[in-house]
């Protein structure tokens, strides 16, 4: 089951009110989910319009 970011944002609000650390939830919310990305190739000057999912940091690229 896939939830929208709105529901996850509500969970973050509850997590903050609880006073407990929920770092894993914050990391999960930072992951790109079907986000538009433009990739440029310097050598050829070509550009590509893509959609990216599952990228949480620069090391995932």
Image: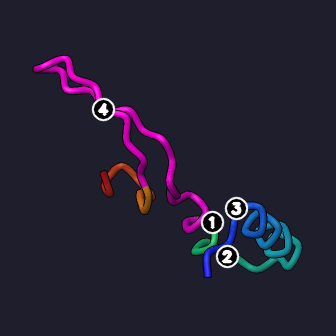
Q: Are circles 1 and 4 on residues that touch, CB within 8 Å?
A: no
Q: Which residues are magenta?
A: 27-52
Foreground: disc 4 or disc 3: 4
Q: Dot 1 surroundings within 10 Å: few (below 14), some, or many (20 or more)? A: some
Task: Assign a secondary structure to mark 1.
Answer: helix
Q: Which mark is residue 26?
A: 1
Q: Nearer the viewer, residue 56 or 6?
A: 6
Foreground: disc 4 or disc 2: 4
Q: Dot 2 surroundings within 10 Å: few (below 14), some, or many (20 or more)? A: few
Picture residue at 50% right of the left edge, 54% below the top: 34
Residue at numbered disc 4: 48
What percent of the width, then of the height, locates residue 9?
Answer: 76, 63
What percent of the width, then of the height, locates residue 54?
Answer: 42, 62
Q: Which mark is residue 5?
A: 3
Reading the chain from its start, which is encountered first: label 4 or label 2? 2
Q: Nearer the viewer, residue 61 or 7?
A: 7
Picture residue at 84% right of the left edge, 67% below the top: 13
Q: Is residue 15 above or below residue 47?
A: below
Q: In screen coordinates, is 16 left or right of 43? A: right
Cα separation, mark 3 vs mark 1, equals: 12 Å
Reading the chain from its start, which is encountered first: label 1 or label 4? 1
Cα separation, mark 4 vs mark 3, equals: 26 Å
What percent of the width, then of the height, locates residue 44?
Answer: 12, 19
What percent of the width, then of the height, locates residue 1?
Answer: 61, 82
Q: Which mark is residue 44?
A: none
Foreground: disc 1 or disc 4: 4
Task: Assign a secondary structure to mark 4.
Answer: strand
Q: Dot 3 surroundings within 10 Å: few (below 14), some, or many (20 or more)? A: few
Q: Is residue 48 above or below residue 10?
A: above
Q: Nearer the viewer, residue 43 or 51?
A: 51
Residue at numbered disc 2: 22
């Amino acid at each position: 089951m896939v939830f929208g970011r709105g529901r996850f944002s509500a969970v973050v609000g509850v997590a903050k009110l609880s006073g407990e650390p929920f770092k894993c939830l914050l990391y999960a919310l930072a992951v790109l989910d079907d986000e538009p990305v433009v990739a440029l190739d310097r050598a050829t000057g070509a550009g590509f319009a893509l959609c990216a999912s599952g990228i949480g940091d620069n090391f995932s690229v």
